[in-house]
Image: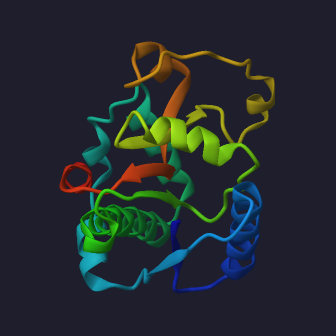
């Protein structure tokens, strides 16, 4: 399992300990964890992350640009840039993980440390990874709001998300499974 931690600390070691304990419990035993350390002051990342809001005009999800604009209004410029730098760092890292010689043809989990895994998770992961090179967590658009509690269970077709999926959900790159190969590295690149 790979995760990314900010070099700034801020209590993330406790979050990581909880995540690792939940993953080991769900797996019924030991797992290997690799924490990739992100430094928000990295000048190269800051330059790449300095994108105007207009760069989100082509968001694939309906309302994606409007959501980015609303998010930008609630963040300081520094926080906005650090968030973009962190996302860029993660994409670079996932491409490197996919290309690493020791990972070739291996299935890895890449997750933000703020997840909790439950028994049965690895069974679902194995089924999905048996059919696809990449499997992402899907979230309701309302995730993290009070409206999320009222969401109904939805059954979606297997495979690539279609129009029905995008009406009420999005793909979360904060939790996914990847079969490592040059093809999956190309996806991130």
- Give the left or right position of residue 14, taking residue 101 as reference: right
User: Is residue 156 positioned above or below 16 on the image?
Assistant: above
The tally of labels here is 0
Q: Residue at x 53, y 79 (%)?
A: 6
Residue 103 occupies which quadrant of the picture?
A: bottom left
Residue 23 occupies which quadrant of the picture?
A: bottom right
79 vs 174, nearest the viewer: 174
- Give the left or right position of residue 3, taking residue 22 as reference: left
Q: Residue at x 25, y 72 (%)?
A: 101
Residue 74 occupies which quadrant of the picture?
A: bottom right
User: Is residue 62 positioned above or below 64 on the image?
Assistant: above
Task: Please say which color scheme the image uses.
Answer: rainbow
User: Is residue 112 positioned above or below 149 on the image?
Assistant: below
Q: Position of residue 76 (x, y in %)?
A: 51, 66
Q: Position of residue 25 (x, y in %)?
A: 77, 61
| Placement of the C terminus among the 4 image quadrants | bottom left
Q: Position of residue 90 (x, y in %)?
A: 39, 65
Q: Residue at x 38, y 43 (%)?
A: 134
Q: Residue at x 26, y 51 (%)?
A: 184
Q: Position of residue 139 (x, y in %)?
A: 59, 35
């Amino acid at each position: 399992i790979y995760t990314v931690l900010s070099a700034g600390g801020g209590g993330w070691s406790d979050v990581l300990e909880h995540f690792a304990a939940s993953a080991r419990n769900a797996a019924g035993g030991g797992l290997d964890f690799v924490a990739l350390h992100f430094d928000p002051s990295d000048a190269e990342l800051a330059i790449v992350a300095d994108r105007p809001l207009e760069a989100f005009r082509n968001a694939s999800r309906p309302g994606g640009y409007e959501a980015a604009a609303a998010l930008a209004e609630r963040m300081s410029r520094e926080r906005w840039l650090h968030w973009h730098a962190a996302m860029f760092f993660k994409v670079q890292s996932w491409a490197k993980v996919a290309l690493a010689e020791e990972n070739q043809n291996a299935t890895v989990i890449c997750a933000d440390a703020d997840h909790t895994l439950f028994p049965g998770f690895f069974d679902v992961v194995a089924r999905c990874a048996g059919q696809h090179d990449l499997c992402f967590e899907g979230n309701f658009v309302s995730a993290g709001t009070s409206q999320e509690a009222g969401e109904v269970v939805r059954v979606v077709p297997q495979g690539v998300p279609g129009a029905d999926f995008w009406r009420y959900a999005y793909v979360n790159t904060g939790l996914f499974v990847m079969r490592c190969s040059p093809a999956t590295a190309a996806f991130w690149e």
